[in-house]
Amino acid sequence: MTHFNKVTIIGVGLIGGSLARVLKDKGLAGEITGTGRSRETLELALRLGVIDRLGQGFARSVENAELVVLASPVGSFETVVREIASHLKKGAVLTDVGSVKGELVQKIEALLPDGVHYVPGHPIAGKEKFGVVEATASLFSGAKCILTPTKKTDPQALAAVRAVWEAAGAKVLVMDPDLHDKIFSAVSHMPHVAAFAMVSAVAELNTGTEDYINFSGAGFKDFTRIAGSSPEIWRDICLMNRDNIVEMLDRYLFSLSRFKRELLAGDGKKLEKHLKLASDVRRGLG
Amino acid sequence: MTHFNKVTIIGVGLIGGSLARVLKDKGLAGEITGTGRSRETLELALRLGVIDRLGQGFARSVENAELVVLASPVGSFETVVREIASHLKKGAVLTDVGSVKGELVQKIEALLPDGVHYVPGHPIAGKEKFGVVEATASLFSGAKCILTPTKKTDPQALAAVRAVWEAAGAKVLVMDPDLHDKIFSAVSHMPHVAAFAMVSAVAELNTGTEDYINFSGAGFKDFTRIAGSSPEIWRDICLMNRDNIVEMLDRYLFSLSRFKRELLAGDGKKLEKHLKLASDVRRGLG
């Protein structure tokens, strides 16, 4: 398995920090440099032993790195890559953990010099709590990790990144970047928008004396948990995968309107049929 | 505290069974009779010691009962009350655990003979697993229980039912039946419809080779967990609280359409503002 003498993690949060821990625990990395926008976070990461060294700026931090991991918010990738591109060494492998692929992958590829190998990735992992203090080598164990190579992707670099994720215990799937964005608009991005919209709708009820949202039970809390996610990150994801998300929102609006129509018509049979279809599918997911 | 010599539970599932366990554990009931549609469930409840006696039909089961609890699906209440009304003894307290109040409360009151005291109730409790095997006296501990008395409600009966729920560890709130239905259309009924519609929308993607829903992560599963609920029960709740649910669905459709509009306009600032409002509210719920 490829051993990386120097690894640079850009953005040492839950995901970047957990991957750093995997690389250390599995002996896949020599020295790990961490960089990012918050000096406080980086110093904490250093104290926690997640990284070995605190990088000075993006460009200098990636010099001589054999593996560079983009783990900052996906909205920052293009800017960061512009900054680091000319400082990456020949033969370096650049990978990322962003939730959007598609056009972003093309943009990043176009910015990189020849001889730098980009392997786009997206681990389907996370938890409610975030930040480097939550980083753990077991985060990816049993999770899916999607790699979205293009025609330009170097097969050896792809194999090396795959091996890292497999060492992390993830199940690696290879997929077209555009298909990735369609699938995740359906099962992640649109549902996040739907949860944000739900909380907005209930919070905006101007009820005077009674604050409805205080009566929310476990169901509402489960349903809207993802609306507690970072607004900045989700703004970026929304804008970067806009077309797919709008298409999925339209499908969702259609499905909601159909329930509303059946409800208005008092059509118990159709209503139950559609409720049952959904209930069966959902129960199948475990 | 009122001691009930004979209690009859109609519908011995998770809620009815758990309440039976509370009544026993706290020494509030002499003999507990269970009745319902499924003989198998009732025999199981008897074996588990949740009830003391298996009732023979609704009407005979309630004879001489001092407390009768309607804990069958809310859609069955009207039919059950028609069947038992003339068999309830003078001074008996009838209560229920249904998720819909409003007009249903009026209908039930109208069916009852003088001298029978109806106290409408709704414990905000439940868990993913259901059925009498899951029944436990601790289910209501720390939960809210809403009682929705009317002008007709006997104060002593109200106090007795309140005492039962307080003994169960619930926090009792008294509320107007119509306000109850408005609040729960917002924080429970509409969100359930939204979750069912979400699973439908994703499941109906006819994608040929890729089954998108298999890529759903923890977020989607949390978001749609409530769509695994019983289609029959939710059909009934939808139809019985139709006007409020349609009004809330309209608000939700408005909120979703606003996000869609901001997304289409590429309006990052407005998008982030609305995402942040929702995120702050959601985080405040814990």
Image (spheres, coloured by chain):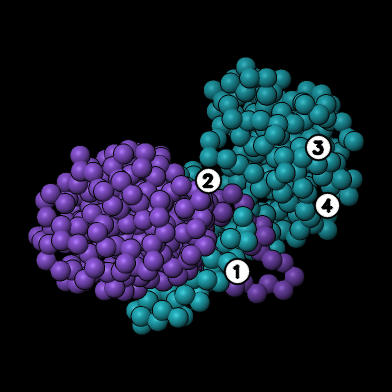
Chain colours: A purple, B cyan
Q: Mark 3 vs mark 4: same chain?
A: yes
Label 2 with label 1: CB-CB less than 8 Å: no
Q: CA distance from mark 3 to mark 4?
A: 21 Å
Regarding residue A143, the answer to whether it shows in the image is: no
Disc 4: host chain: B
Residue that lies at the very extreme toward the top in this rendered image: B47
Q: Nearer the viewer, mark 2 or mark 3?
A: 3
In the image, what residue occupies the spot 49% across and 44% down?
Answer: B229
Q: Nearer the viewer, mark 3 or mark 4?
A: 3
Q: CA distance from mark 2 to mark 1?
A: 27 Å
- The residue that label 2 is drawn on is B233
- The residue that label 4 is drawn on is B153
Q: Which is nearer the eye, A223 or A16?
A: A16
Label 3 with label 4: CB-CB less than 8 Å: no
At label 4, which amino acid type do we have? Thr
Q: How many marks?
A: 4
User: Tag 2 or tag 4, which sits nearer the N-term?
Assistant: 4
User: Tag 4 or tag 3, which sits nearer the N-term?
Assistant: 4
At label 2, which amino acid type do we have? Ile
How busy is the neighbourhood of tag 3: few (under 14 within 10 Å), some, or many (20 plus)? some
Label 1: which secondary element: helix
Expressed as whole percent of the image width and height from the top left, the position of residue B95 reads: 74, 42
In the image, what residue occupies the spot 9% across and 60% down?
Answer: A151
Please determine whether, in this image, residue B56 is positioned above or below residue A35.
Answer: above
- The residue that label 3 is drawn on is B167
Label 2 with label 3: CB-CB less than 8 Å: no
Q: Which is nearer the eye, B253 or A146?
A: A146
- The residue that label 1 is drawn on is A203
Label 4 with label 2: CB-CB less than 8 Å: no
